[in-house]
């Protein structure tokens, strides 16, 4: 009873041609069950009331409040995004588009992160963690300079383990 039910098409061009025919021969010549009007005639009437689209593309934006976790992250859409250390308040405003998550506090932008795909991921901006930063860097440097001695064994030892 509608356009797609049981319909087959080769490609987008074929689908559009079938749709044009269906609109012209079926949909726009019958009285619509809900409105009680012929759709093509109703459209002509409604066009007089329609506004033109704005010159710039619409960017969907979600705005909501969130609390910062104890470890300095804000949850949004199943993922977590870091905030800088040292915030005075633990509440932030999340403003998210399809590409970016921006975190605000008292109207001031704290940080913008790219949207993470999927769920259960974390995005940490390393500059957001100042505590023990020098200590961690010192340990990493020290570890990179340490040499580890590995015992040499024959392959027979490993083959014995696998049996």
Image: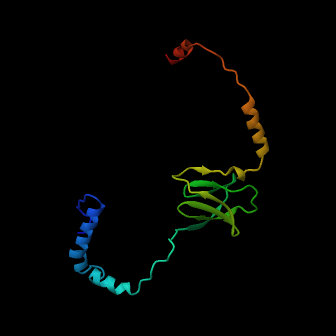
Q: How many labels sit on residues? A: 0
Using the image as rendered, state which of residue 59 and residue 103 is in the foreground.
59
For residue 13, what is the image quadrant?
bottom left
Residue occupying the point 69% across, 49% down: 126
Q: Is residue 66 left or right of residue 40?
A: right
The residue at 58%/13% (across/down) is 154
Q: Is residue 69 above or below residue 105?
A: above
* Residue 102, position as x, y percentages in the image: 62, 62
Q: Image height check: is 100 above or below 31?
A: above
User: Residue 95 at x, y = what percent?
Assistant: 60, 65
Which image quadrant for residue 136?
A: top right
User: Residue at 55% of width from left, 54% of height from top?
Assistant: 116
The N terminus lies in quadrant: bottom left
In the image, residue 92 above or below residue 41: above
Q: Quadrant of residue 109?
A: bottom right
Residue 113 shown left or right of residue 39 in the figure = right
Q: At 74% from the left edge and 55% from the top edge, which residue is drawn? A: 85
Q: Residue furthest left?
A: 25
34 and 107: which one is in front? 107
**Residue 3 at x, y = what percent?**
26, 67
* Looking at the image, residue 114 lies above or below residue 93: above
**How was this image coloured?**
rainbow
Instruction: Where is residue 101? Give x, y as percent.
Output: 59, 60
């Amino acid at each position: 009873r509608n356009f797609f039910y049981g319909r087959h098409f080769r490609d987008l061009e074929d689908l559009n041609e079938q749709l044009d025919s269906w609109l012209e021969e079926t949909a726009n010549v019958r009285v619509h069950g809900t409105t009680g009007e012929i759709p093509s005639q109703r459209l002509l009437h409604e066009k007089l009331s329609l506004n033109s689209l704005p010159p710039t593309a619409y960017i969907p934006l979600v705005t909501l409040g969130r609390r910062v976790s104890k470890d300095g992250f804000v949850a949004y859409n199943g993922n977590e995004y870091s905030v800088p250390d040292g915030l005075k308040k633990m509440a932030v405003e999340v403003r998210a588009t399809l590409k970016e998550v921006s975190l605000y506090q008292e109207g001031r932008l704290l940080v913008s992160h790219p949207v993470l795909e999927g769920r259960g991921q974390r995005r940490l901006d390393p500059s957001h963690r100042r505590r023990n930063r020098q200590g961690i860097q010192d340990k990493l440097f020290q570890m990179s300079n340490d040499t580890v001695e590995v015992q040499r064994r024959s392959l027979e030892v490993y083959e014995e383990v696998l049996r």
